[in-house]
Amino acid sequence: MTQYLARPISKGALPAVLALLMTLLALPAAFAEEEGLYIETLNHTSGLMGETPTEELSKTYIAYGKMKVASSKSDGADMILDPTTGTMTFLNNAKKEYYQIDVKSMMEGMSQPGMEQMRAMMEKTQIKVEDTGETRKIGDWDCTKYEVTKTGMMDIQQEIWAAKDVDLDLDRFNNLMSMSGPNGLLGDSAAAKAQRAEMEKVKGYPILTKTRMQMMGSTMETESEVKVIRHEPMPASMFEIPDGYTLKDMMAAPPSAAGHP
């Protein structure tokens, strides 16, 4: 190889060599983006503390082992989940500020009595999933209807329409967000395993989820419908904190998080 490199470049070969060099120089830019997953979800909420019903379109981006949920509201916050570091980052784009939660450190810092009380409350949650056998087409997907009942800390009724032909595994992101899963408060306890086993009866990815819950003396209803699922290139910078953003105390001014699928 070195003997060829040592030879002088002829005028005839110069254009080809220059073209090769330009191609090599362009490689970092060409590989600067990774094909990620884009999910678009329309969220409806009503009955929240007497407020008027709301509608919000959330855009979810998944790549580089991270998830970003961008809010369509001008006063909303973007959220970045990083299961590797165990952090949740909220971006206030209007004020160019960001807030962070280190889930692992937060759980380790909780007092033992507080953890035991919360764990006891969560262990009382009972989940029942029923496959109704009812099917319908929602958007581009053939879905099956599941009825989910959760009792314990809150009484929750859910109607989930799931599609088996959508192969998505977002458990690591959902576990981080809800502090559940094997590393959550319940860990691998019998109660946790029973709850996860029951939810695994929902086969496929939820395309339409209708939720009705009793909270603080009022009934809140939400509806989330997935509109788009596609693969597209995404830059790594999309999942980083933008330059010029200032870190703020999460407890001083907690932002409103965007919805997620």
Image: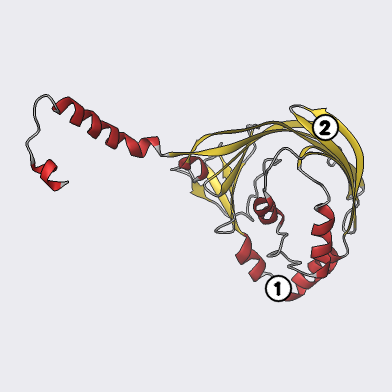
Left or right? Give the position of 207 relative to 11. Answer: right
- Depth check: 99 or 208 in front? 208
Q: Position of residue 239 (x, y in %)?
A: 52, 44
- Local packing at callout 1 (Cα closer than 10 Å; few below 14, some 14-19, many 20+) is few
Pointer 1 residue: 111
Pointer 2 residue: 52
- Depth check: 140 or 241 in front? 140
Left or right? Give the position of 83 relative to 233. Answer: right
| Kind of residue sitting beneath label 1 | Ser
State the residue at coordinates (55%, 57%): 84
What secondary structure is marked by label 2?
loop
Q: Position of residue 152 (x, y in %)?
A: 90, 59
Q: Position of residue 209 (x, y in %)?
A: 81, 39
- Residue 162 in view (yes/no): yes
Quarter holding the C terminus is top right
State the residue at coordinates (64%, 56%): 251
- Residue 46 in view (yes/no): no
- Depth check: 13 or 126 in front? 13
State the residue at coordinates (72%, 55%): 178
Label 2, label 1: how many angstroms apart (C-alpha)?
A: 38 Å
